[in-house]
Image: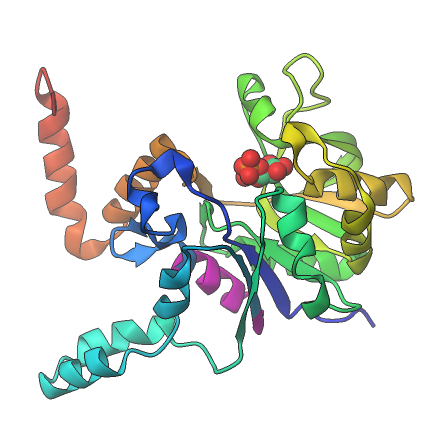
């Protein structure tokens, strides 16, 4: 029987330069959509998928992330004194079992592949997930859970994918497609951030992966690739070259690229509109401001 997937790596070491100056002192994973930080959405999706061990690959300046998932005795005491049961309930979202989160440091920003490799000693000989908190996916059926289910039948590596416009392919890992069957896209190749002309398809990898331990071994050997960084994509390409199955999983739902300002703002609007207590007032405001000739100038 295939081993259950219970471990997930969250690469959170990035500098977040696209959100400077805010990210000078706040990790970008703590930026909020309405009132919940990006990392909370990622953790919730992983928890719903049955993940039990959460491995954060961090760097200097990310201590706010560790505090976020720690208990806050003074705050809790104050809320209890004021009988704020609803707020205490909200705080429970951040409650993680002792020992469920492990932190490893990436000493130098050498790329996503290197960040994942930094967690190798905590993974061992079992398949594992990688979740990029920048990619927020709103869906009735959480993406990672759906992937784990689909993976149980075929094994190998599985990557969340979606079709992107041709001019966007240079921003992503792109699949060379051998076969499409329902939600599954079998890859015969994968290339990191190709030019528009060189891209083998428009099937782009989004930040959810199920990987095998041999990917970690490849990451220890491969040279730096696109952008001078150790690319996860290149290690996955090696799996394909060794004849191992690699599939894209065309997930359902709306994905927001919260690593970009435009995507982050779109997610903020969408999540605000999905909240019953905000929806009417916020929708009214959007109508009004869009009707103004020089909105927010
Ligand atoms: C990373 C991966 C890329 C993937 C993307 C998804 O790129 O290297 O293959 O398509 O995440 O968000 P980054 O966005 O970190 O440049």
Point 76% across, 31% down: residue: 177
- Can see residue 192? no
Q: Is residue 280 above or below residue 171?
A: below
On-image quarter of the N terminus: bottom right
Asked whether 56 falls inside the magenta stretch, the response is: no
Badge count: 0
Q: Which residues are magenta?
A: 40-53
Query: Which one is nearer the viewer's eye here, 266 or 261?
Result: 261
Q: In this image, 259 relative to 273: left or right?
A: right
Point 35% across, 71% down: residue: 93
What colour scheme has been applied to the protein in the rendered image? rainbow
Magenta-colored segment: predominant secondary structure: helix
Query: Which one is nearer the viewer's eye here, 187 or 117?
Result: 117
Q: Position of residue 155 (x, y in %)?
A: 79, 57
Point 74% across, 44% down: residue: 247
Q: In this image, 214 relative to 58: left or right?
A: right
Asked whether 50 falls inside the magenta stretch, the response is: yes
Q: Position of residue 43 (x, y in %)?
A: 47, 63
Which picture quadrant has residue 7? bottom right
Q: Position of residue 12 (x, y in %)?
A: 50, 53
Which picture quadrant has residue 95? bottom left
Q: Is residue 101 above or below residue 226?
A: below
On-image quarter of the C terminus: top left
- Can see residue 126? yes
Q: In this image, 2 relative to 195: left or right?
A: right
């Amino acid at each position: 029987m295939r081993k259950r997937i219970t471990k997930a790596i969250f690469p959170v070491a990035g500098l977040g330069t696209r959100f400077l100056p805010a990210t000078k002192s706040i990790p970008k994973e703590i930026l909020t959509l309405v009132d919940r930080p990006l990392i909370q959405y990622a953790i919730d999706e992983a928890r719903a998928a049955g993940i039990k061990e959460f491995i954060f690959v961090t760097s200097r300046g990310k201590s706010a992330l560790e505090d976020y998932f720690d208990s806050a005795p003074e705050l809790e005491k104050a809320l209890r004194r004021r009988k704020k049961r609803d707020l205490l309930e909200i705080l429970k979202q951040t409650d993680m079992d002792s020992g469920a989160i492990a932190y490893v440091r990436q000493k130098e920003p050498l790329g996503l592949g290197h960040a994942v490799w930094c967690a190798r000693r905590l993974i061992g000989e079992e398949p594992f997930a990688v979740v990029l908190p920048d990619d927020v996916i709103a869906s009735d059926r959480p993406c990672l859970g759906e992937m784990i289910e689909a993976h149980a039948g075929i094994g190998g590596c599985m990557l969340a994918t979606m079709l992107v416009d041709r001019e966007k392919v240079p921003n992503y890992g792109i699949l060379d497609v051998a076969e499409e069957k329902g939600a599954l896209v079998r890859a015969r190749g994968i290339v990191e951030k190709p030019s528009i002309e060189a891209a083998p398809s428009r099937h782009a990898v989004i930040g959810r992966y199920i990987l095998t331990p041999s990917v970690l071994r490849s990451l220890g050997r491969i040279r730096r690739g696109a952008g001078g960084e150790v690319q996860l994509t290149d290690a996955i390409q090696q799996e394909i070259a060794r004849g191992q199955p690699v599939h894209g999983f065309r997930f359902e739902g709306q994905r927001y690229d919260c690593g970009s300002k435009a995507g982050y703002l779109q997610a903020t609007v969408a999540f605000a509109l999905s909240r019953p207590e905000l929806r009417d007032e916020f929708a009214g405001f959007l109508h009004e401001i869009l009707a103004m000739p020089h909105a927010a100038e």
